[in-house]
Amino acid sequence: MQGLKLDDRDLKILATLSREGRLSKAELAKRVNLSPTPLWERLKRLEDAGVIRGYRAEISLKHVAAHIEVFVTVELENHRAESFQTFERTIEQRDEIVSCWAIGGGFDYVLHVVTRDIESYQQLIDTLLDGRIGLARYYTYVVTKPVKTGGVPPLHRLADASGPDVSSLQTDD
């Protein structure tokens, strides 16, 4: 976030929304001690700057359908820009791959895969291998139990040290 300075109200808005994204604008304004119009202006500024990227529901998949979650570390055969671009374009097209991070260290990427079962996971991997997208090695880690998910970023710890002291921000009245 370059060029956009957040004040304590902005941080309180973000902290509140990250925990309770369904709050009405009127309730959010009340929680951060603003009238609706200034709140709306701040939200618009935060959205336009890309600080707020979207609003979504957190779904409990165990209540929807049987599934497995898998984390996959990936090494590519080549480390040329074209190889990374080919891999990333392919990954973008697969809806079973819900997240993908390029990382430093011994691996090139970490994938988070959600699919029906281990067989459908293996079909995905076989398709990626057959697609010749430069995948050299992959390592599979099946999630056996979620311990902590949907965490909220520690905004008070991330705030610029020269900015406001937001460590005591309350997100509800």
Image (cartoon, rainbow, N blue to C red):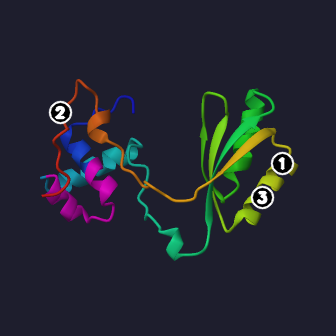
In the figure, is residue 109 to the left or right of 167? Answer: right
Can you tell which quarter of the image residue 84 is in? top right
Structural distance between the alpha carbons of marks 2 and 3: 49 Å
Q: Earlier in the sequence, mark 1 or mark 3?
A: 3
Residue type at mark 2 is Asp
Badge 3: few (under 14), some or many (20 or more) residues near its Cα, within 10 Å? Answer: few
Please tell me which residue lies in front, 63 or 93: 63
> Magenta region: which residues?
14-32
Q: Earlier in the sequence, mark 2 or mark 1?
A: 1
Q: Position of residue 49 (x, y in %)?
A: 39, 41
Q: Residue at x 49, y 58 (%)?
A: 146
The residue to which callout 3 is attached is 122
Q: Could you tell me what secondary structure mostly forms the magenta stretch?
A: helix
Q: Is residue 29 magenta?
A: yes
Instruction: Residue 172: give x, y in percent of width and height.
Output: 17, 57
- Return the residue at label 1: 129
